[in-house]
Image (spheres, grey):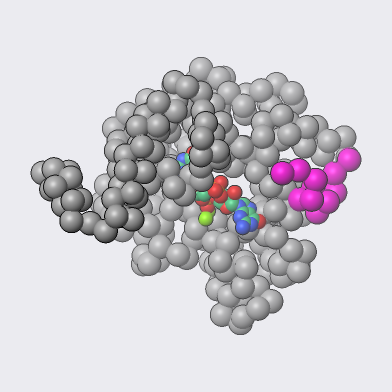
Amino acid sequence: EAKNAGVSQIRSFHPALKENFRQRIGLESALREALERKQFFLCYQPQVSASTGRTVGMEALLRWQHPELGLVSPLHFIPLAEANGLISHIGAWVIDTACAQLAAWRQAGHADLRMAVNLSATQLLNPYLEDTLLGAIASHGLVPADLELEITESVLIQDPDQTVLRFNALRKLGLRLSIDDFGTGYSSLSYLRVLPVQAFKLDRSFVEGLGKDETSLEICASAIRLAQNLNLDIVAEGVETSAQAEWLRALGCPIFQGFLFARPLMAEAATAHLAQERAGGITAEAAGTELP
Ligand code: C2E
Ligand code: MG
Ligand code: MG
Ligand code: MG
């Protein structure tokens, strides 16, 4: 098997690679214990309406606080969890925790707020996903439409037929589906004809190019127009400057997410943010500067 081959091959690797391999093994076993050791937590990043300046949704973003390594980026440990099969287990915790948080915010009077949760390829294809989702939704007194699942375009390339089946099954349950990092997946736009999605997330790389290069501007404009014409929502990711927000506003983008409005916030800070916003104490663009 490939794993055995990997172990015997490692002898001939450069010392740095050996070190890397050991690190990976170390990280992997630490990851296995992270859940029961309660080392995971969620941050929440506001998704803000362009027209009202109010938070209409929160994206749950997973964080791993490792005792020695400190905060490990999901960009590092999610691929590891995908490879070793832990992702669905961790993902179930994310779904339940995000639903519990949304229920708490609902109780606090934030009636129309939605929760967005990221799903990776393996999670999408996991046959227990529906049970996990419906279980969490029901146990926290929510309905499926309260939850939006963010799935990257690149997932489609891995197994297009299964992806279509899975999207249809999830949509049938009433969940909202969103294409994450729209425009970066090297996939054909024809998937839009077969996938029942409600939203795109315009990738940060295009937003970053606004005001810098003409191509990014045209890509943003086209994506926003495409969403409008298909009657879908579009969320601009990674909005960091007011110049970018102005461009996006001019192009008709309805929802913004990014450091300009708010960073991913710890649960308590996110709760305070919502409360303050409702009390009228936050102007959308001042929020980005206040918290870590
Ligand atoms: P994503 O879903 O595209 O999430 C957006 C990422 O951009 C987040 O990084 C967020 O912190 C960051 N971000 C938000 N606003 C700005 C901004 O204005 N400027 C810049 N430079 N960055 C901004 P994060 O939290 O490190 O997450 C990285 C990726 O990890 C996510 O990308 C998502 O694909 C994945 N991920 C995070 N949480 C989960 C999870 O619970 N499950 C799964 N399967 N994947 C997750
Ligand atoms: Mg996302
Ligand atoms: Mg994204
Ligand atoms: Mg992204």
Which residue is at the far bottom?
214
Observer-nearest of 82 and 150: 82
In the rendered structure, the answer to whether residue 273 lies left or right of residue 235 reads right
In the rendered structure, the answer to whether residue 26 lies left or right of residue 223 reads left
In the rendered structure, the answer to whether residue 80 lies left or right of residue 71 reads left
Q: Is residue 182 visible?
A: yes
Q: Is residue 2 visible?
A: no
Q: Quadrant of residue 77?
A: top left
Magenta-tinted stretch: 281-292
Q: Quadrant of residue 91?
A: top left
Q: Quadrant of residue 285?
A: bottom right
Vertical order, 192 against 56 (above or below): below
Vertical order, 230 against 78 (above or below): below
The picture places residue 33, in percent across and down from the top left corner, at: 40, 26
Observer-nearest of 156 and 273: 273
Vertical order, 50 against 150 (above or below): below
Residue at left offset 76%, top offset 69%: 243
Observer-nearest of 285 and 251: 285
The picture places residue 8, in percent across and down from the top left corner, at: 14, 47
- Which quadrant, please, contains the C terminus? top right
Q: How many marks?
A: 0
